Image (cartoon, helix red, strand yellow):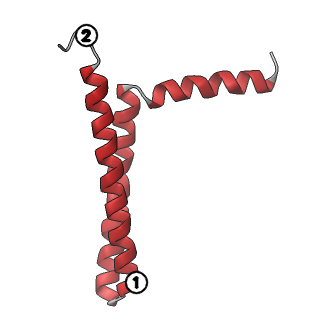
Amino acid sequence: MSKIEKAKGQSASLKGFKHSKPGLWLSIGTSAFGAISIVKDARKAREENDTLKLVNALVGAAALITGTALLVRELRQLGSDDVLLG
């Protein structure tokens, strides 16, 4: 098996993980760490009275909230597809 074929196989398995419950929970967890960084940036921008940095932090927060909402929706849809959950 060549390195390319091996890499394709690993890539396919990672794509499956990305859309599984553990993968979605991991993504939501990494978003939480991103929120910490955004809060720090916003505080620093407010201390320095830097409007542009504050706007950047707010836009980043909006993107983080939207991304997390999409992940939660996908997690709920994944749960509703499960026959055992009813």
Residue at 28% over, 39% down: 72
State the quadrant of the N terminus.
top right
SS of the residue under disc 2: loop
The amino acid pointed to by label 2 is Val
Q: Say if mark 2 contacts mark 1, CB within 8 Å.
A: no
SS of the residue under disc 1: helix
Label 2 neighbour load within 10 Å: few <14, some 14-19, many 20+: few
The residue at the far top in this view is 84
Please state the horizontal and vertical placement of residue 19, each as a whole percent of the image.
43, 29
Please state the horizontal and vertical placement of residue 56, each as a whole percent of the image.
40, 74
Q: Is residue 7 visible?
A: yes
The residue at the far bottom in this view is 49
Please state the horizontal and vertical placement of residue 42, each as a whole percent of the image.
32, 74
State the quadrant of the C terminus.
top left
The residue at the far left in this view is 86
Query: In front of the other: label 2 or label 1?
Result: 2
Task: State which quadrant residue 51 falls in.
Answer: bottom left
Please state the horizontal and vertical placement of residue 48, each as a whole percent of the image.
34, 89
Query: What residue sits right under mark 2 in the picture?
Result: 83
Answer with mark 2 or mark 1, whichever residue precedes in sequence.
1
The amino acid pointed to by label 1 is Leu
Q: Is residue 36 visible?
A: no
Query: What residue sits right under mark 1 in the picture?
Result: 52
Above or below, comparing residue 39 to residue 31 in the picture? below
Label 1 neighbour load within 10 Å: few <14, some 14-19, many 20+: few
Residue at 63% over, 25% down: 10
